[in-house]
Amino acid sequence: MLAEGLDRVLVFEDDVEPDFSTLTLLPDTLQQLPDDWELVYLGFLKNGEISRKHWQKRQFYKLLATFKAYNWLSCREVNNLFPKPYSVNLRVAGLHDCTHAYALTRSAAQKLIEAQTPIYSAADEVLTHQVLRGQLKAFICNPTLFDQQGFNSTGHRGDGSYVSD
């Protein structure tokens, strides 16, 4: 992306599937992005909705972080764990699994390269780390517009294989 001088790209998993029941929302959803967006998840798993349970979990995790009960999550990262309201079809991103489909800008690509040099993790985990650290201006679509073959809202469908027939 950077070598080609591209400002924005759309990335799909090799087994991505459009959700035709929601895909018509794509143009309106993209119009809701702020001018300075860097990443938007168009398809993902986990934490798509905003709920009171998330607020309660966040408070508990903040308490644990305050007392340094664990060292893998800072208070700042706890604040960014769950999505926050933004617009009709967008939420501020939090902790989400998988990257069925996403779009990113040149500035996000540069930040991700810097964060991943040397390579230490899978791409979707690097995105998550950067979002939780507040390093990317990231959003999720609500509802999601893409799915991934062999997945449902909780993960793999449990057929025992990642390989499609």
Image (cartoon, rainbow, N blue to C red):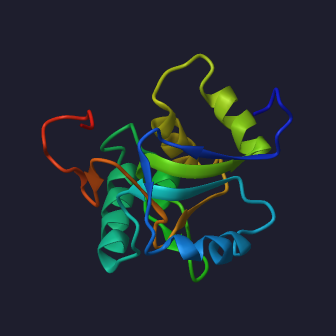
Image height of 156 relative to 19, above or below:
above
Residue at x-position 71% and y-position 43%: 108
Residue 48 at x, y percent in the picture = 41, 67
Which of the image's four quarters has the N terminus? Answer: top right
Q: Is residue 68 above or below residue 54?
A: above
- Point out the residue furthest to the right here: 5
Which residue is farthest front?
165
Residue drawn where x is 13% and y is 37% of the image: 160
Q: Please state if 31 lies on the left or on the right of 90 as rendered.
A: right
Q: Please indicate whether residue 103 sits to the left or right of residue 82 in the image.
A: right
Q: Is residue 89 above or below residue 76?
A: below
**Residue 158, percent from left and from top:** 14, 46
Identify which residue, 88 or 159, lies in the foreground. 159
Height in image: 101 above or below 59?
Answer: above
Which residue is at 37% across, 63% downward?
47
| Position of residue 163 in the picture relative to residue 113 (left or right) | left
Whole-percent x, y for residue 12 in the image = 53, 45
Judging depth in this view, the residue of 85 and 156 nearest the camera is: 156
Image quarter of residue 59: bottom left
- Name the residue rendered at 73%, 74% in the picture: 31
